Image: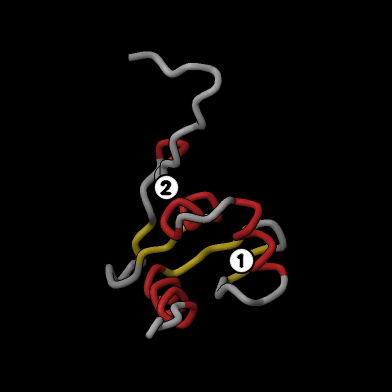
Amino acid sequence: MPRMKSDPPAVNPNSQGSAPRVSPTGTQEFFNARQAAGYLGLALSTVRRKSRDGSLPCHRITPRNIRYIRSELDVWVKSQSHEVE
């Protein structure tokens, strides 16, 4: 069924046709900001803001080239969780 104009766009962590990059040793997955947003279920603007203010772990390759390591994002998600009694 075709998407209607009022439907929100589907979030795809592999948008732009690219899969997360794997390090040369094959042990870590690297995401760009859009992929990290999809993986975390956050808006792209939120990922960029949290990266800028230092609350989300990221690696700046160049000022505009930022990468996120999946295992670091997993640790960050666990640190953000609050247990409810």
Where is residue 15? Give x, y as percent: 45, 39
Residue at mark 1: 61
Task: Spot the residue most to the left.
Answer: 26
Foreground residue, 80 or 59? 80
For marks 1 and 2, the one nearer the N-term is 2
Foreground residue, 56 or 8? 8
Q: Residues within 10 Å of mark 1 (few under 14, many from 20)?
A: few
Foreground residue, 71 or 21? 71
At x 32%, y 14%, the residue is 1
At x 67%, y 63%, the residue is 62
Q: Secondary structure at mark 2?
A: loop
Q: Secondary structure at mark 1?
A: strand
Nearer to us: label 1 or label 2: 2
Figure quadrant of residue 53: bottom right
- The answer to whether 45 is drawn above or below residue 83 in the figure is above
At x 69%, y 57%, the residue is 64
At x 45%, y 41%, the residue is 11
**What mark, if any, has residue 13 been given in the picture?**
2
Label pair 1/2, CB-CB below 8 angstroms: no
Foreground residue, 78 or 82? 82
Where is residue 75? Give x, y as percent: 41, 79
Whole-Å distance between the Cαs marked 1 and 2? 20 Å
| Tag 2: amino acid | Pro
- The answer to whether 35 is drawn above or below residue 82 in the figure is above
**What mark, if any, has residue 1 been given in the picture?**
none
Where is residue 23? Give x, y as percent: 36, 66
Horizontally, is 35 left or right of 28 in the view?
right
Horizontally, is 26 left or right of 19 in the view?
left
The quadrant the C terminus occupies is: bottom left
| Tag 1: amino acid | Ile
